[in-house]
Amino acid sequence: ILNVEQSPQSLHVQEGDSTNFTCSFPSSNFYALHWYRWETAKSPEALFVMTLNGDEKKKGRISATLNTKEGYSYLYIKGSQPEDSATYLCASITGGGNKLTFGTGTQLKVEL
Amino acid sequence: EPEVTQTPSHQVTQMGQEVILRCVPISNHLYFYWYRQILGQKVEFLVSFYNNEISEKSEIFDDQFSVERPDGSNFTLKIRSTKLEDSAMYFCASIIGTGTIGNTIYFGEGSWLTVV
């Protein structure tokens, strides 16, 4: 994998459903993986910064896992609420640099 | 919670005009970035800045672009002669230290630039 890719591109779920998205990134020279939640007209909100293989992080109903050997991360939302509707971006840092390389994002819509 | 602020939120400019986008990073942060997102595309890195000089820049960041920290609080992005393809949302970001490993990078709300 050369680029950061996210799937699915968009997702519609019902309130109360649990959901998950995938972020794939280059596994060689991996440094860190960042997850952001981005609502229109607001700044991207940092959710997690993950660096170690096997890392699992949690913030309320949202959690994330990291597999640096195979180059993927999952973001989970338990019991989705309408306020979870946003675009979820992942971005990786590789090669000792300090810049984020972003995926295209997963657009989540939670319906009542 | 401290935040990165950007002005203007939206600017419309004529092709060929100069534009300056302004950012106030979080006060104790030392490392700054500009990113942009062209509509429908990925957020992409433009430049990083530390200790009053460019740390890294992308291929996009050509001679038309420049950055400056004029007064110790503001961080600006200047586009000298705008082109239609410069139309995008420009994000400023900052981080507390020189190393990004494990540290959160904070983003502003973005400045939407439309070149006509």
Image (spheres, rainbow, N blue to C red):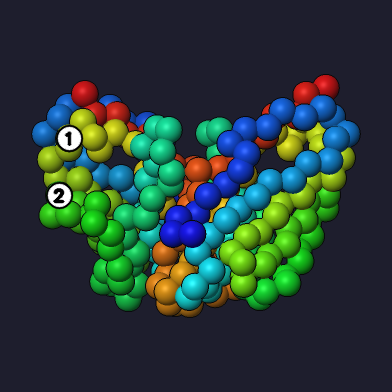
> Is B26 in front, or is A34?
A34
Task: Name above or below for residue A79 compared with residue B105.
Answer: above
Q: Is residue A78 left or right of residue B110?
A: right
The quarter in which the C terminus of chain B is drawn is top left
Tag 1's secondary structure? loop
Q: Where is residue B7 drawn, in percent x and y?
A: 38, 42
Task: Name above or below for residue A106 compared with residue B95.
Answer: above
Q: Residues within 10 Å of mark 2 (few under 14, many from 20)?
A: few
Do the residues bearing badges 2 and 1 touch, measured as CB atoms within 8 Å? yes
Q: Is residue A45 left or right of residue B29?
A: right
Q: Where is residue A52 drawn, in percent x and y?
A: 66, 75
- Give the residue type at disc 1: Lys
Q: Residues within 10 Å of mark 1 (few under 14, many from 20)?
A: some
Q: Is residue B111 visible?
A: no
User: Which residue is depicted at the point 53% across and 69% down?
Assistant: A27
Q: Is residue A3 left or right of residue A84?
A: left
The residue pinned by badge 1 equals: B83
The residue pinned by badge 2 equals: B64
